[in-house]
Image (cartoon, rainbow, N blue to C red):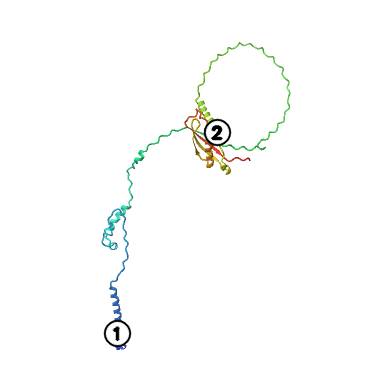
Amino acid sequence: MTDAIIAHPRVEHMPPAAVALAVLLHALVGVGIWWLSSLQPTESQEEPIMVMFDSSPSNVGLQDPARTGPPAESQAASPSPSTEPSREPEQQQALAPAQPSNEPAQPSQSSQAMPQPEPVPTLPIYEFSVPPVPEPPPAPTSRDFPKPPAAAPRRPVQRTQPMPPRPAPPAQQRPAAEAPALIPAPLPGPNPADQIAGRGRQRNDYLSRVFRQLERYRVYPAAARDNNLGGRVVTRVTIKRDGGLIDARIDTSSGVPVIDQAELEAIRKAAPFPPVPNGMPGDPVILVLRMTYGPPRRGR
C-alpha cells in the first residue's frame, strides 16, 4: 500500500474526499485479512477428562482397557446413553442393606458335644467373728454423780407403854394325817431344742479353741504398724475331721496386703487344729474366720 502511494506523484494534490476514500479502503482490507485469519483452524489443547468406574458386583459396562481399541479419553468424550442408567440400579443394589434371615442359628456341634460338669456337693460353713475391742468409757467426774437430797428434820419419838402378854390357848391334839403315797414321775424324753443347743455349744466351743490357737501365731506387721494401717480380713479355712489343714485363702481382703499375708502365715503355722467334734457335720469342714487388725490404742 505504501508503494501505491509513492507511485503517484500527485498525491499531494488529491482532494480530501479521495484521501478519505483511500483510508477507508485500507481499513476494509485490514478487516478482511483479520477475518480470514480467524477462520483458519488452530490446534486446540484438549483438557484431560477423568473417567471413574463403579466397583459394583456385576461386570456390566466394565471393559478391559488392554482389549478395547479406542483409549479412555475417546470413550469419555462420547459416552453412550445406555451405560449411565444401567449403573444406577447396580449402585442401589450394592447400597441396599442385607436382610437378616429369619432362620434360627443352629448351635455348633462342639457346644453340644461338651460334657456337663458334675454338681459339686455343698458343705456346711461355720463362721466365727471376733468383735473389735470397745473403747473404755471416760472416767466419771463429780458432775456425773447426783447430789444427795437434803436430810429431812427428825420427828421426836413418842414412847408407848408395852401391852401385857395374852395367855396362849391350850394346844389341841390333832390326829396324825396319813402320809400320801409316792408316785414315781415319768422320765423326761430328749428335747430337740436341747440337742440343737448342745450342737451350738459344741460349735462355739470348737471355734473358740481354734481362735485361741491362732492367737499364738498372729503378729501385727511392722510395716502396717509404722504407717498406722489396719483393716478387717476374712479367711476361708478348709480342714479335715482330724484337724489337718487342707486349704487357706483370703475371702475378703483388708485392703492392706501385708495384713492379709500375716493372717495366712498365722493359719499355716497354727495347723494342725483340734479334731472336729461329732456335733459339727461335714467332711471336710469349712471355717470362715474374721479378724480385725488395727493400730495400738493410745491412752487419753
* Front one among 144 and 8: 8
Total label count?
A: 2
Q: In the rendering, at what x and y percent does residue 23 appear?
A: 31, 82
Task: Report helix, strand or loop for mark 2.
Answer: helix
Can you tell which mark lies on residue 3? 1
Would you identify the image quadrant in which residue 291 lies? top right
Can you tell which mark lies on residue 129? none
* Front one among 61 and 294: 294
- First reached walking from the N terminus: tag 1 or tag 2: 1
Q: From the viewer's perspective, is 79 left or right of 248? A: left
Relative to 225, residue 176 above or below? above
* Front one among 293 and 80: 293
Q: In the rendering, at what x and y percent does residue 118 appear?
A: 40, 34
Q: From the viewer's perspective, is 42 left or right of 276? A: left
* Front one among 285 and 171: 285
Can you tell which mark lies on residue 213? 2
Q: In the rendering, at what x and y percent does residue 17 appear?
A: 30, 85
Relative to 230, residue 207 above or below? above
Q: Nearer the viewer, mark 1 or mark 2?
A: 2
